[in-house]
Amino acid sequence: MTHLVVFDVDGTLVDSQNMIVEAQRRTFEAHGLPVPDRTRALSIVGLSLPEAFIALAGQDAPVAALVNTYKQMFQELRHDPAFAEPLYPGVAMVLESLAARPDITLAIATGKSRRGVDHMLARHGFTDMFASIQTADDAPSKPHPGMLLQAMRATGAMPDATVMVGDSTFDMLMSRAAAVRAIGVSWGYHAPALLREAGAATILEQISALPALLAGHATVGDDAAEGMAQGGL
């Protein structure tokens, strides 16, 4: 059986926090609105932009204008080396390892735009690695299960043969809604305790542990992870 492994992007594969926080700061200042602090700014990573700005600024905020300004600011920051979006350590090696396995299909489910994802994939040489790419342009915002449901339909995967790897509670709640096993990561923007509360079956401390976990050979110290280890995916 082929298994589907779906990855979030921001906070899971790439460390985009400095870019996101600065783009938000410039956006809110451009509209004369109070700038969220860093913790608040990162708390909404994973949502699509309209939902993110509603969460940050309220229903009565000029959401469409904020989204347009944010996109402009983000594009400008892409040309500034001080705001690079590096891969987290070990990500490239793990993705290449998983992509080479005949029993695994890779996919993406992210609140980024398709343009942003394509830029990231091209920059890191991942263009042909993912069989399905679900973005904020393609489906309702997380935690709605649409992205995962569409990824499964596109690849023919069943829920019990699918896992979602992400750093946010939105990823965990989306997984629960789609009846998919959720794997949280500790290096992202939401605390591991919150990921567990939202439904994470286990929390990865290092991306290098993922291949063994998927193969059913990891030793992780909680019941849910041990169950996964015994049964693979």
Image (cartoon, rainbow, N blue to C red):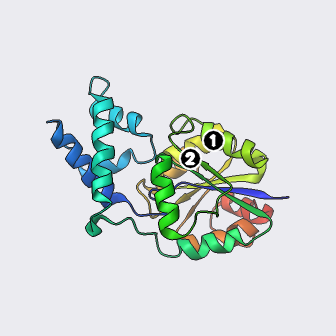
Tell me: 19 left or right of 13: left
User: At numbered mark 1, what does the secondary structure look like: helix, strand or loop?
Assistant: helix
- At x 72%, y 52%, the residue is 162
Note whether 71 is above or below 129 in the view shown: above
Note whether 193 is above or below 90 in the view shown: above
Horizontal and vertical percent for residue 47?
A: 45, 41
Horizontal and vertical percent for residue 11?
A: 44, 58
| Residue on which the image places disc 2 | 172
| Residue on which the image places disc 1 | 176
Tell me: 181 left or right of 69: right
Answer few, some or many: residues within 10 Å of disc 1's Cα (few below 14, many 20 plus, some between 14 and 19): some
Answer few, some or many: residues within 10 Å of disc 2's Cα (few below 14, many 20 plus, some between 14 and 19): many
Image quarter of the N terminus? bottom right
Tell me: 21 left or right of 150: left
- Amino acid at pointer 2: Met
Q: Nearer the viewer, residue 44 or 50?
A: 50
Residue 132: numbered disc: none
- Of all residues, the one furthest to the right in this rendering is 1
